[in-house]
Amino acid sequence: MAPPALSNLPLFAETMHPSISTEPYKSGDPALAYVDEEAETAPRFDNKYEERKYLKHRLAIAFRIFAQFGLSEGVAGHITLRDPVEPSSFWVNPFGLHFSLIRDADLIRVDHNGKVIEGGQNRRLNYAAYAIHAEIHKARPDVLCAAHSHSTYGRAMAATGRTLSMLTQDFCVFWDDHVRYENFAGLVLAPEEGQAIARVLGNKKAAILGNHGILTVGPTIEATVAWFVLFERCCQIQLLADASSTGTGIQLTTIGEDEARR
């Protein structure tokens, strides 16, 4: 079947939200600051099973977003969702299924003892996912979602032995809100190492796992994913800035503590 002719496709303006102005940009135009409150506000559920269904769908989307941004590496990495029906369990991707292929029905539910309770046909549990995420969910009742993958720049940053400098305003999202975990001991297969990661993470939103990768947590799936994408990009910019200044005698300019705090 031939693709549709370009002339038959709707113009971008015709597909835009009706509250978005199509007038030329004007600085300070209040029409540009629109907020679609229905789109921005998460739905409320009286039925926890309906909430579970909704959140599982959002989690499946999160995996595909990671794949789209190139944040997946083979079968490594995991994103978890605290179950709203039974909060002492969480949903996670089954081992061996690429992020780009994950659907709602593929997700598996695991309790804090590592037992797979329900899920799709493939119920193979990545034990590292259990060892890390179970301890984070137990230690942080405020966390709905946690994400970890072996992303390219996250891994490179994890080898530097440092945290982020506040180089641009985007970095300030992580000012005093990210940590570095140093004790690399290979695959995280022991609950004790998961507990150690949770302790170092504390109440922060992000962590650089030394010689391993990066991790973000959040009160929603959307926040966790957005922070992970931004954290990865900040790692990339940090590495580029460091490389560009090496051997030049130029010292990188960083944002001051007072400004970063704002």
Image: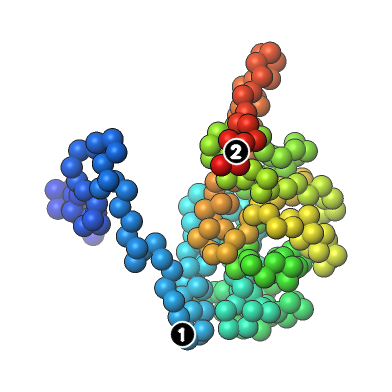
User: Identity of the amino acid at label 1?
Assistant: Asp
Q: Nearer the viewer, residue 251 or 1?
A: 251
SS type, badge 1 = loop
Q: Position of residue 180 (x, y in %)?
A: 75, 46
Per the image, the residue denoted by label 2 is: 260
Q: Position of residue 230 (x, y in %)?
A: 55, 46
Identify the image quadrant of residue 81. Answer: bottom right
User: Identity of the amino acid at label 2?
Assistant: Ala
Q: Which mark is residue 198?
A: none
Q: Are marks 2 and 1 in contact (CB under 8 Å)?
A: no
Which color scheme did the rendering employ for the protein? rainbow
Per the image, the residue denoted by label 1 is: 46
Q: Nearer the viewer, residue 200 or 175?
A: 175
SS type, badge 2 = helix
Q: Earlier in the sequence, mark 2 or mark 1?
A: 1
Q: Position of residue 135 (x, y in %)?
A: 75, 68
